[in-house]
């Protein structure tokens, strides 16, 4: 009876040791598998387990030393216990067989199963474990410190300098991956907005500006009636004011200031005192930079100039915001002028159409790393002004020149994209 009680006690102790081994193995995997950004977020929200886990992971060498110390201790005790019991029951052959069985039991129940569970549910395992390890580390710290000193000494020979770990900043591409992987946690619309913000550094003012020849402004040399008509019909809140041509810009007029003029015969020269200083920015400025500059200078309109100071176009704060959130309004007239669906599988496109706007409105994939307009893209490829009926293919899109004049392509016909598999066929 006494032997039976003794055997039952040894088996119970062995089960406890195996459970401790499983705890150490699983918690190690869980803590190392925690998403550091989710961990920081939960810690800032006040989650106690997350706060303790974050503190432990600042010095991973210490927590790993503690876990390995405990895991090896219980595994050695379990193996010794099995060897003692086996020796009493069957001698050397029983010890060999028991060691083999014990190895399999530890491998399955104390290593593979708990580590797999911890990898699948790191927070459920890691946070409770952190609440145990944090006070335990303080209790056995001298022993862990001696262990780590020996381990760090070995690492020092190989040029490794263990220390407090810092949360590494994500790159732009890594952030894009995080946004993509968010799935249903972030709506499709917000995902597009976040990705657009990340791409602001890649897009420049040249990509979104109104070209030089399309800038709407007030020419003080025009007839009074024409200026009055422009002011009454414009949908813009700010207009550049110039003499003869936009290169001779004088300032920028905010339409709200016209309310200060007395209701009498209109004199264009009265606009000059109402003008703000024109704001110039160099071409190639990233939209992320320009957005900050608009905010700092309290500006809404900028004129884009090249290296010689010649005006290339105009960009507004609204243009940049539309790159993030999409179009504020639908300018159906402009879209109708730029793209007209001729048939179910072809479109007539104005040569001056902006490539980025075409890609966005038509869901096309024309290259945007070169010229900004379709006319410029074709001319760069052909290096000459083509004759009507000339055909070419750009990024899989068959393009036919429909109409040209002396210095540019006026209209082209664009067909549906031909995929690479179709090309191969």
Image (cartoon, helix red, strand yellow):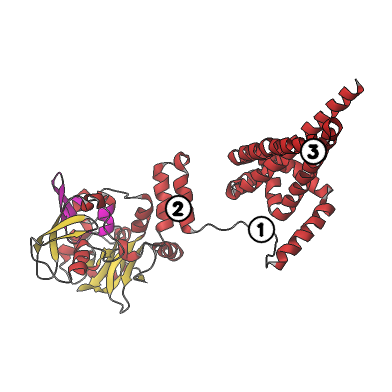
Please say if 43 is above or below 101.
Answer: below
Please say if 186 is above or below 220.
Answer: above
Kindly identify which residue carries mark 3: 78
Q: Secondary structure at mark 1?
A: loop
- Of badges 1 and 3, the one in the foreground is 3
N-term-proximal mark, 1 vs 3: 3
N-term-proximal mark, 3 vs 2: 3
Question: In whole angstroms, how far apart are the C-alphas of marks 1 and 2?
Answer: 24 Å
Please say if 49 is above or below 302.
Answer: above
Kindly identify which residue carries mark 2: 176
Q: Secondary structure at mark 3?
A: helix
Q: Which quadrant is home to the N terminus? A: top right
Label 1 close to label 2 by CB (< 8 Å): no
Q: Residues within 10 Å of mark 1 (few under 14, many from 20)?
A: few
- Tell me if 141 is positioned left or right of 320 in this view: right
For this rendering, which residue is in front, 260 or 53?
53
Q: Residues within 10 Å of mark 3 (few under 14, many from 20)?
A: many
- Tell me if 187 is positioned left or right of 134 in this view: left
Q: On residue 360, which mark appears?
A: none
For this rendering, which residue is in front, 386 or 248?
386
Kindly identify which residue carries mark 1: 165
N-term-proximal mark, 1 vs 2: 1
Residues rendered magenta in the picture = 335-359
For this rendering, which residue is in front, 106 or 394?
106
Please say if 17 is above or below 169.
Answer: above
Q: Is residue 253 visible from the viewing direction of this image?
A: no
Q: Secondary structure at mark 2?
A: helix
Find residue 330 and report its horizontal and vertical position in percent: 26, 48
Question: In whole angstroms, how far apart are the C-alphas of marks 1 and 3?
Answer: 34 Å
Tell me which residue sits at (58%, 46%) in the image: 38
Find residue 376 and report its horizontal and vertical position in percent: 21, 66
């Amino acid at each position: 009876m006494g032997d039976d009680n003794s055997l039952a006690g040894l088996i119970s102790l062995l089960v406890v040791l195996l459970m401790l081994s499983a705890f150490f193995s699983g918690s190690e995997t869980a803590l190392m598998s925690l998403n550091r950004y989710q961990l920081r977020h939960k810690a800032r929200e006040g989650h106690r387990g997350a706060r303790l886990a974050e503190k432990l992971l600042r010095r991973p060498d210490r927590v790993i030393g503690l876990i390995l110390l405990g895991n090896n201790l219980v595994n050695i005790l379990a193996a010794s216990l099995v060897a003692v019991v086996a020796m009493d029951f069957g001698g050397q052959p029983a010890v060999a067989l028991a060691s083999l069985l014990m190895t399999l039991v530890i491998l399955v129940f104390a290593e593979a199963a708990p580590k797999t569970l911890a990898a699948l549910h790191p927070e459920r395992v890691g946070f409770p474990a952190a609440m145990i390890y944090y006070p335990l580390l303080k209790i056995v710290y001298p022993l862990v410190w001696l262990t780590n000193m020996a381990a760090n000494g070995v690492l020092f020979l190989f040029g490794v300098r263990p220390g407090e770990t810092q949360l590494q900043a994500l790159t732009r591409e890594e952030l894009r991956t995080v946004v993509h992987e968010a799935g249903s946690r972030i709506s499709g619309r917000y995902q597009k907005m976040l990705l657009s913000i990340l791409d602001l550094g890649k897009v420049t003012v040249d990509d979104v500006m109104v070209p030089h020849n399309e800038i709407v402004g007030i020419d003080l040399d025009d007839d009074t009636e024409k200026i009055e008509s422009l002011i009454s019909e414009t949908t813009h809140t700010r207009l550049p004011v110039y003499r003869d041509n936009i290169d001779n810009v004088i300032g920028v007029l905010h339409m709200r200031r016209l309310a200060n003029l007395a209701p009498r015969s209109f004199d264009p020269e009265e606009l000059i005192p109402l003008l703000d200083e024109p704001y110039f920015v160099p071409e190639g400025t990233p939209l992320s930079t320009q957005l900050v500059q608009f905010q700092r200078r309290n500006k809404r309109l900028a004129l884009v100039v090249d290296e010689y100071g010649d005006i290339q176009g105009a960009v507004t704060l609204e243009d940049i915001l539309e790159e993030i959130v999409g179009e504020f309004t639908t300018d159906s007239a402009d879209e109708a002028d730029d793209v007209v669906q001729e048939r179910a599988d072809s479109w007539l496109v104005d040569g001056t159409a902006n490539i980025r706007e075409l890609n966005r409105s038509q869901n096309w994939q024309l290259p945007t790393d070169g010229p900004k307009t379709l006319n410029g893209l074709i001319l760069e490829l052909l290096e000459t002004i083509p004759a009507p009926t000339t055909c070419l293919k750009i990024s899989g899109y068959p393009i036919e020149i429909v109409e040209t004049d002396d210095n540019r392509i006026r209209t082209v016909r664009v067909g549906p994209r031909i995929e690479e598999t179709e090309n191969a066929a």
